[in-house]
Image: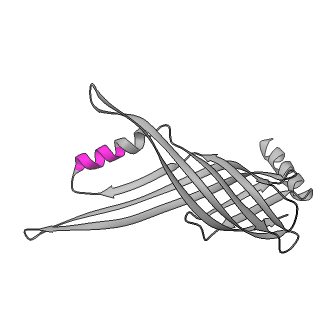
Amino acid sequence: MRSIICLLLITACVGFGGVAFGINPIGTIPECYIGYQVGPAIPYFSINYAGFSGSVEYRYNGSVDTYEASASVLMPTLGTKLFLGSSDLKPFINFSTGKPFFAVDVEVDDPYFEDDLDDFIDGLRSTFVFTGGTGVEYFFAEQFSVGGEFRYRLLTFGGEWEFYDDEFTDVRGFIGATSTGMWLNYYF
């Protein structure tokens, strides 16, 4: 039954011409979104991905220790883009919130470090991302636009970890960062 309802909703969205799709391949964090335009507003679903990998080689007294690490973050978000004009050059504001999912792999010779890192990643509970941005889109055709955007992202994190039977560590914090991006958009 759910499949039929989803298929009907997708068909109605495409049939009535309100679906919006965009990609940001040039920004600091590549992303894409799909949404539905309702007047000047576009509620949307977006996916962000970031990852890194690296290694460190430590040499001392003829010995060599190698440490390797890789990490990735997949972050689905829900948001709304609100257009503030009606010409071919449309300014907009954008707000979204999301829940990041982390994957970390570290190879070191210290089993306590690996266990502590695994406990830390497993203990992250209140991690969310809030984003606010502003930008402009230029509609060079009726259904196509190119745009630029400036954003501020705020990552909140926190959790509680038990290192021994009766010792707990509670950590809370946030990280804020700005980013820019160039969007390519298609409106069905």
- 81 to 174, vertically: above or below: below
Instruction: Tell which residue pokes out farthest to the right in this image.
Output: 16
Instruction: Tell which residue pokes out farthest to the bottom in this image.
Output: 140
Seen from the viewer's position, the closer of residues 57 and 6 is: 57
Determine which quarter of the picture holds residue 145: bottom right
User: In the rendering, at what x and y percent does residue 28 appear?
Assistant: 55, 65
User: In the rendering, at what x and y percent does residue 31 appear?
Assistant: 62, 62
Which residue: 31% across, 67% down?
A: 55
Report if residue 155 lies within the magenta region.
no
User: Quadrant location of the N terminus?
Assistant: top right
Overall secondary structure of the magenta stretch?
helix
Which residue: 35% across, 45% down?
A: 118
Left or right, 136 with reference to 174: right
Left or right, 183 with reference to 63: right
Left or right, 126 with reference to 31: left
Which residue: 77% across, 60% down?
A: 91
Seen from the viewer's position, the closer of residues 130 and 87 is: 87
The stretch in magenta equals 111-118
User: Quadrant location of the C terminus?
Assistant: bottom right
User: In the rendering, at what x and y percent does residue 82 appear?
Assistant: 78, 52
User: In the rendering, at what x and y percent does residue 115 appear?
Assistant: 29, 45
- 184 to 40, vertically: above or below: below
Which residue: 68% across, 49% down?
A: 95
